Amino acid sequence: MSDSPSSYAVELSGLTKVFDTVIANDNVNFKVRPGTIHGIVGENGAGKSTAMKMLYGVYRPTSGAIILNGKKCDFSSPLDAIKSGIGMVHQHFMLAGPYSALDNIILGAEPGYDSLKWMPKLLNPISRKKARQKIERLVEQYGLSVDLDVAVEDLPVGVQQRIEILKLLYRDARILILDEPTAVLTPQETNDLFLNLKRLKNEGKTILVITHKLKEVIGFTDRVTVFRAGKVTGEVETSETNAQELAGLMVGRKISLQIDVPMAENVGRPVLAVKGLTLRGMRGSARHRLFDVTFEVYSGEIVGIAGVEGNGQSQLLQALVHPNESACRSAGLVKIFDSDVTEMGAEKIKALGVGFIPEDRHKEGLLLSRPLNENFLLGLQRTVHFSRFGLLANKRVIERTKAAINEYDVRPGVISATSGSLSGGNQQKLIIAREFERNPKLLIAAQPTRGVDVGAIEFIHRNIVKARDEGAAVLLISSELDEIVTLSDRIYVMYEGQLVGHFSRETCTEKDLGLRMAGHFGVEGSASKVE
């Protein structure tokens, strides 16, 4: 293929974006061939989403150029980008739940009656027949099956995503940008998505996919651009690379992407027992947020809770860590070491030997404006190790903080640094160091690698397995299916507030888990609906 500018659907040339004193993108250069699926990968904060938002007109570049099909473009808003044939599906869908799929697709681009073209657009009634005909042609052409008359809020997440893609096609987009498109999809929905994207590619569409899931990049893209610290560090043909090489380009060093975790060998007595836990819906809703949840976690094992986000995992965490604050609890019992903790506060529960890695480290795990030693002390300030006669043993706190940040490789290793100044991976390492200081008998780890640098994931996984091997009971709640399957000895699936499947890691498959995550319970094999 020629290297002339017209050979490329998209070209970013010297693109730089500065927010106050922060350089989000620094001299970004890359090209996208027409009719291809192009992966955009990088760690959180690497600058990939910022670059794509400049392409879509959300941000204006500080310097540099955006070139489409050989023509330099200057976008002052997404409307300019849409007029140039660019569309974007954001990670969090932009849909009006109570409205039908058809209404969502045409919103902002409603067609009027051809016979009334002489009227001002605002006065020309919407021709739903005309809109439906165009959408049905698109559905047939691209295989994007959608019931146009159903309210969006009543449709599965995978179908909602098809609606977002149809919105772009309805506006005649030739270049489609998808930001973390599989973040809330089951494995089956993910596979369907990429089959649809390949169909779009074959019809001549150019597709840019922002993702952190290297397995998907290798499986479905034609070419990959890698970002690190606001710059492009590599651009390769997918067929000529592998996940290991891409990860190295993302972090600047060689790393191990997955550890080998043998099955638990020394499983002991039950540590956590949850029986019949039910949380009513808010504001008189007939739908329960949790319904009859029952399971146990034994010492020396890791039990994973898999599921698409928003199916009750956050409510389960709240009920386990802050049971006395769980609103609308109508039934159920939570025991730790045979002690009923259903009415206990978080501090008393942690005193039983419970460590907690929260799903939102900024909200629950850290004081971002305070130094590392104060963050390390959180929840430990009343223990005999750090307190004497009601007074803090500051020297001991400093010594243990220094030892912990060295042992857990928290960078920079300066205890006066604020936790907010650390990267996501180092913030998570600090939380793990603190929680392991308790020598927990029960570790509840929620989304432990969310927003974490690729290089820190292996470290976090090894420490979770280490806790298990030292006799702790571990409850792992994660939306990353690979993480659940890699680490867990037993796996439950949560769907709409219920546990709908129970598997052993040795016998389950990704297909089995994915079907349960999507609400399909007739799965053959070792799984059973949890009664």
Image (cartoon, helix red, strand yellow):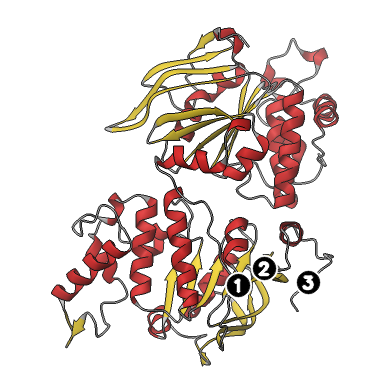
The percent coordinates of residue 375 (x first, y second) are: 28, 65
- Left or right, 194 with respect to 321, comes to right
Residue type (three-letter) at the residue carrying disc 2: Arg
Q: Residues within 10 Å of mark 2 (few under 14, many from 20)?
A: some
Q: Is residue 92 in view from this perspective?
A: no
The percent coordinates of residue 167 (x first, y second) are: 69, 31
In the picture, residue 115 is in which quadrant?
Answer: top right
Label located before the other in sequence (2 or 3): 2
Q: Which residue is mark 1?
A: 263
Q: Which mark is residue 505?
A: 2
Q: Secondary structure at mark 1?
A: loop
Q: Which residue is mark 3?
A: 526
Residue at the (65%, 41%) spot, across then down: 95
Residue at the (49%, 72%) spot, across then down: 444
Judge by depth and name the residue closer to the eye, 25 or 121.
25
Judge by depth and name the residue closer to the eye, 449 or 370.
449
Q: Number of callouts in the render? A: 3
Residue at the (48%, 51%) spot, across then down: 256
Quick check: marks 3 and 1 in contact, CB under 8 Å?
A: no
Quick check: marks 2 and 1 in contact, CB under 8 Å?
A: yes
Measured Cα–Cα span from mark 3 to mark 1? 17 Å
Measured Cα–Cα span from mark 2 to mark 3? 10 Å
